[in-house]
């Protein structure tokens, strides 16, 4: 049977481009619209999900299509995050071109950084079989944070680099960000949102929560007490004061039951966060972060769609299935493996740049082994071979801990259990998926669908 | 700053535990052709069990024995529940599954024992020995660890190369069909491989714990070190794992001594990358070209 | 049927004095084989004679200790396997060697990889010229699949197809690059009599438009389709010539009788 649909699309050159671009555009419009009607908290989750999806498109290509299990993609995200932070902090003009710098350039350079690192690791990894590659990338995941800590003056050490999120020109938050801006009430609200974003950062960090170091309250009180607080001070407050490292902060959040004592400390913030935000502004920081994350995810998704559904996707699968047979028909096996690494690394770096903007921080603890593991978890759960699977995986990674949190609060589980329940669930789910449905959720769905199609279609000859 | 000799001696105990962990990786690889990335997770978990036993009985030795038994049982459970059912064709799946087990064990340990780092007792005082009237950074405990490792390696070498069990295990790993025809119960041999590896890993864990402290993920870094040592040693070779395990420990100790502890993972990564660049299949393994 | 007089004046593919030693064993000893253009050449011999090693030397899987491979008058040095198809040499693998997770059509399409000029950047942006290129390749793939009568299974995965059909897909994959020389490694291995007759018909229909070198065990097929036959035994050429010549050659009979006794 001819593949009539593809034949049809190929008959009109450019229609594939148009189709994929339209799809990405429609999704972008829908998500951007969604971003405007949900509250700040949801926007934050949306930003995270889009950020994870971006990285997982790369995982689909690397782990799924090209069959190279990588534990290093979290570290590759760090490359993007740091390139973004460094270039946006230090560069005022584009090198060589001399154009004025803006955040888009930082994204471009983050992507380039990913490509370069991907070339290096890919060239090393292309020679390796499965477990050796996994071990090497594990080393990268453990090694890159160490490298970051090696250069504290440039990369900020453990504390990381704090980031000024680049707002659109003329947008409301611009005035908040300019260093000598008046810090009025609405700006304070604005900041609290900002700060909560930092504090609530990556909930899915695999590092199990530590004891009772509950610093969220301290931090917020610290912030609230200071009256004339410029954003920069405030951010330092987040980063340094009260011994609030990012990790502590996360743990602080993880330690909090859903209806935490936070509501007593700062009632106006916690009772219903959306109220405070929406009255202050109709476009808060989280929404801006989410819109950046969505845009990047849609662009990367467009590229991934072109690659996966086009010739390149077949090449990657061929190299994975049988490198010898691939070589015989003119495909360079190492070329195929390296290109998968480069693409995946670029996507990871872009995702990392977005992550840094969501955290307003690029710090080694954010890009540790836990992040790499959660990417692996997401792509395995969603389905290693499909881009929709990557999106499902991203949603799961963001939603599952929330769901487990609320569930454990309902059941009254001890904090120690509740904090670690999401990771336990991830681990068990990964094992279960590998054993029962190696192609993940999406693989299961498409398997069912094709079974239904087969049974409903008239029996074909041959 | 200390002397070269000081750093060298200081690396011995580290090297010995890395060697033991690498040994556990090699044992699993030899019996099932899987790199068990969950090995440190298993070692951590059994060390917690051992610590519980120590706290109850007050005896370090009973802790060790309980840990070894728990290690064997856990190895068996992981093998039977996870690794045996993984489809042979799904090479990535086996690797991913070991990481799934690692995540599950770490979070389970944090649930039961919290994530707080704990001190683990030593059977011998953890203080520098005095040699020729000079206190050296080699502690009695370091010497103890080294001796335990040597004894264990000798025992395993004899077990695997001189006994019928060891030969059956080798046969099952390299040629399951032939082994089966000659009456070897292959699946039992694979399980025994996992059990022994679990026990060796448990010993490694109990010995590491006093040095690094015990928490759900303090052992992670040892996974990288042990993997590096095992790969440089060829993944198949017990002697290679031990030699390069000790070598890795010494190099890392020197790196830590002369520069900074945070350089250790970077150096391990460079060692690993260099080795894999020149020997993509490990230093001591023979490259087998696919027959076409 | 054309009669070839040895030595050939202008072989398209020429293996010259090739020796190969693998782990101490001499696999090929000064083997010279010429493949004339526009004909089907057979390479036969008892098991372990070194037939597949000849293929592997040509494909760059095995490095020759001495001797050379000449193609179209030029010497092939340091053969990189994945460059072969772009030079015009295509081969099938023993068994089928299809990619299990791709459909028959996708497998065949990949056979044209050497013809694809656009790179990964153009692919990632779905540039219109990649569509033009893919469309051309598809038309070619459909034509080859039609020729091999496998067009009706284009959307099936290899595991869903009977073995003889899989072998045809593999041949179509090797053919789609329109090679100057097609190397077939045991095309009849594992297929039944009816499919064998089809296979013979297909291979014969290629003469004189295509040049084929085939390694095969099935004597009937070889005698039926080949214009020229080379016989290897224990790493050396023991006979060559037309099917009739080879059939009656005492050395060949002795070599094959030796195998029967084993």
Image (cartoon, coloured by chain):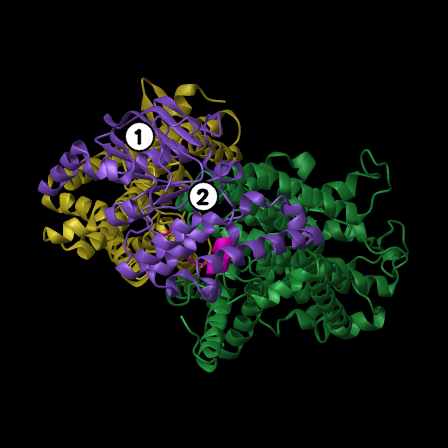
Q: Which chain is yellow?
A: B
**Crowding near pointer 1: few (<14 within 10 Å), some, many (20+)?**
some
Percent coordinates x, y for residue B24 in the rendering:
29, 44
Provide the chain ID for the residue under circle 2: C
Q: Which chain is purple?
A: C
Provide the chain ID for the residue under circle 1: B
Task: Report the magenta residues as a range.
Answer: C96-108
Labels 1, 2: one chain: no
The front one of A380 and B125 is A380
Total residue callouts: 2
Which of the 4 image quarters holds residue A427?
A: bottom left
Location of mark 1 (residue):
B243
Taking the image as shown, residue A327 lies to the left or right of residue C42, namely right
Which residue is located at x 78 percent, y 75 percent? A275
Is residue A280 placed above or below C238 in the rendered structure?
below
The front one of A356 and B134 is A356
Taking the image as shown, residue A17 lies to the left or right of residue B185, namely right
Question: Chain A's shade in the image?
Answer: green
For marks 1 and 2, give the one nearer the viewer.
Answer: 2
Location of mark 2 (residue):
C208
Q: Is residue A444 located in the magenta-colored stretch of the structure?
A: no
Q: Residue furthest top?
A: B132
Q: Is residue B90 visible?
A: no
**Crowding near pointer 2: few (<14 within 10 Å), some, many (20+)?**
few
The image quadrant where one finds the C terminus of chain C is: top left
Q: Is residue C107 located in the magenta-colored stretch of the structure?
A: yes
Pointer 1 and pointer 2: residues touching (CB < 8 Å)? no
Q: Is residue A126 visible?
A: yes
Of the numbered discs in the image, which one, if any, rests on residue C42? none
Which of the 4 image quarters holds residue C3?
A: top left
Which residue is located at x 79 percent, y 72 percent? A276
Is residue B17 placed above or below B5 in the rendered structure?
below
């Amino acid at each position: 049977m001819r593949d009539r649909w593809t034949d049809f699309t190929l008959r009109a050159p450019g229609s594939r481009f148009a189709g994929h671009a339209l799809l990405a555009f429609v999704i972008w419009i829908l998500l951007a619209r969604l971003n405007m009607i949900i509250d700040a908290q949801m926007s934050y989750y949306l930003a995270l999900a889009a950020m994870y999806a971006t990285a997982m498109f790369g995982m689909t290509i690397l782990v799924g299509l090209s069959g190279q299990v990588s534990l290093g993609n979290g570290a590759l995200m760090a490359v993007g995050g740091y390139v973004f932070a460094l270039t946006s902090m230090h560069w005022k003009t584009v090198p060589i071109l001399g154009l004025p710098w803006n955040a888009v350039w930082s994204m471009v350079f983050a992507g380039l950084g990913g490509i370069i690192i991907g070339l290096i690791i890919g060239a090393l990894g292309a020679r390796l079989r499965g477990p050796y590659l996994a071990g090497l990338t594990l080393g990268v995941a453990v090694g890159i944070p160490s490298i970051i800590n090696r250069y504290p003056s440039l990369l900020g050490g453990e504390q990381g680099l704090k980031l000024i999120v680049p707002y659109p020109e003329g947008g409301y938050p611009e005035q908040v960000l300019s260093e000598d801006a008046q810090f009025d009430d609405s700006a304070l609200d604005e900041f609290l949102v900002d700060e909560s974003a930092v504090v609530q950062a990556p909930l899915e960090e695999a590092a199990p929560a530590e004891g009772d170091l509950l610093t969220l309250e301290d931090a917020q009180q610290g912030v609230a007490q200071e009256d004339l607080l410029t954003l920069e001070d405030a951010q330092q407050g987040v980063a340094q004061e009260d011994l609030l490292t990012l990790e502590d902060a996360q743990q602080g959040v993880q330690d909090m039951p859903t209806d935490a004592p936070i509501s007593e400390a700062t009632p106006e913030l916690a009772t219903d966060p959306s109220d405070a935000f929406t009255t202050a502004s109709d476009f808060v920081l989280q929404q801006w972060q989410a819109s950046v994350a969505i845009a990047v995810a849609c662009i990367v998704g467009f590229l991934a769609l072109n690659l996966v559904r086009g010739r390149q996707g077949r090449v990657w699968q061929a190299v994975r299935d049988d490198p010898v047979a691939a070589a015989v028909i003119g495909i360079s096996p190492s070329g195929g493996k390296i290109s998968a690494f480069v693409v995946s690394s670029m996507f990871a770096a872009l995702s990392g740049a977005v992550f840094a903007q969501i955290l307003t921080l690029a710090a080694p603890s954010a890009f540790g082994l836990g992040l790499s593991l959660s990417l692996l978890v997401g792509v395995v759960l969603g389905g290693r071979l499909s881009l929709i699977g990557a999106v499902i995986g991203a949603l799961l990674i963001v939603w599952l801990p929330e769901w487990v949190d609320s569930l454990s609060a309902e059941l009254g589980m001890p904090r120690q259990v509740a904090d670690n329940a999401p990771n336990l669930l991830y681990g068990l789910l990964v094992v279960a998926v590998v054993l029962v449905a190696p192609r993940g959720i999406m693989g299961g769905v498409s398997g069912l669908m094709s079974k239904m199609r087969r049974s409903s279609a008239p029996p074909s000859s041959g | 700053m200390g002397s070269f000799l000081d750093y060298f001696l200081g690396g011995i105990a580290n090297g010995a535990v890395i060697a033991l962990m690498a040994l556990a990786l090699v044992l699993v690889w030899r019996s099932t052709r899987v790199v068990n990335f969950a090995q440190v997770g298993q070692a951590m978990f059994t060390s917690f069990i051992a610590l519980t036993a120590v706290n109850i009985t007050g005896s370090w030795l009973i802790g060790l024995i309980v840990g070894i038994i728990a290690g064997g049982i856990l190895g068996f459970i992981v093998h039977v529940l996870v690794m045996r059912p993984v489809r042979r064709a799904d090479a990535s799946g086996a690797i991913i599954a070991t990481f799934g087990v690692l995540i599950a064990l770490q979070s389970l340990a944090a649930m039961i024992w919290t994530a707080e780092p704990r001190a683990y007792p030593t059977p011998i005082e953890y203080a520098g020995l005095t040699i020729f009237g000079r206190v050296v950074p080699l502690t009695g405990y370091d010497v103890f660890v080294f001796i335990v490792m040597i004894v264990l390696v000798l025992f395993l070498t004899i077990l695997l190369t001189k006994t019928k069990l060891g030969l059956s295990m080798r046969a099952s790993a390299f040629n399951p069909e032939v082994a089966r025809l000659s009456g070897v119960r292959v699946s039992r041999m694979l399980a025994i491989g996992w059990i022994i590896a679990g026990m060796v890993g448990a010993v490694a864990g109990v010995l590491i714990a006093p040095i690094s402290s015990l928490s759900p993920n303090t052992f992670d870094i040892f996974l990288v070190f042990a993997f590096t040592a095992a790969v440089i040693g060829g993944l198949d070779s017990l002697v290679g794992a031990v030699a390069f395990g000790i070598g890795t420990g010494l190099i890392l100790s020197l790196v830590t001594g002369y520069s900074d502890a945070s350089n250790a993972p970077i150096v391990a990564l460079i060692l690993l990358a260099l080795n894999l660049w020149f020997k993509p299949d490990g230093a001591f393994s023979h490259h087998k070209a696919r027959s076409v | 049927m054309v009669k070839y007089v040895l030595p050939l004046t202008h072989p398209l593919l020429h293996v010259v004095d090739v020796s190969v030693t693998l782990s101490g064993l001499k696999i090929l000893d000064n083997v010279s084989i010429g493949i004339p253009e526009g004909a089907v050449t057979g390479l036969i011999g008892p098991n372990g004679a070194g037939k597949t090693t000849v293929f592997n030397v040509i494909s760059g899987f095995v490095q020759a200790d001495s001797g050379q491979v000449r193609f179209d008058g030029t010497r092939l040095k340091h053969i990189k396997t994945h460059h072969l198809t772009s030079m015009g040499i295509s081969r099938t693998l023993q068994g089928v060697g299809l990619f299990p997770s791709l459909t028959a059509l996708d497998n065949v399409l990949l056979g044209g990889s050497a013809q694809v000029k656009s790179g990964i950047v153009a692919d990632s942006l779905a540039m219109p010229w990649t569509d033009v290129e893919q469309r051309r390749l598809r038309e070619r793939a459909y034509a080859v699949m039609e020729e091999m009568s496998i067009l009706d299974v284009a959307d099936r995965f290899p595991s869903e197809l009977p073995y003889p059909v899989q072998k045809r897909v593999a041949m179509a994959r090797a053919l789609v690059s329109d090679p100057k020389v097609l190397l077939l490694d045991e095309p009849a291995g594992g297929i039944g009599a009816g499919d064998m007759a089809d296979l013979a018909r297909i291979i014969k229909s290629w003469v004189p438009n295509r040049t084929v070198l085939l390694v095969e065990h099935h004597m009937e097929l070889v005698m039926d389709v080949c214009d020229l036959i080379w016989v290897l035994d224990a790493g050396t050429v023991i006979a060559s010539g037309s099917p009739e010549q080879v059939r009656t050659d005492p050395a060949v009979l002795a070599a094959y009788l030796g195998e029967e006794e084993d």
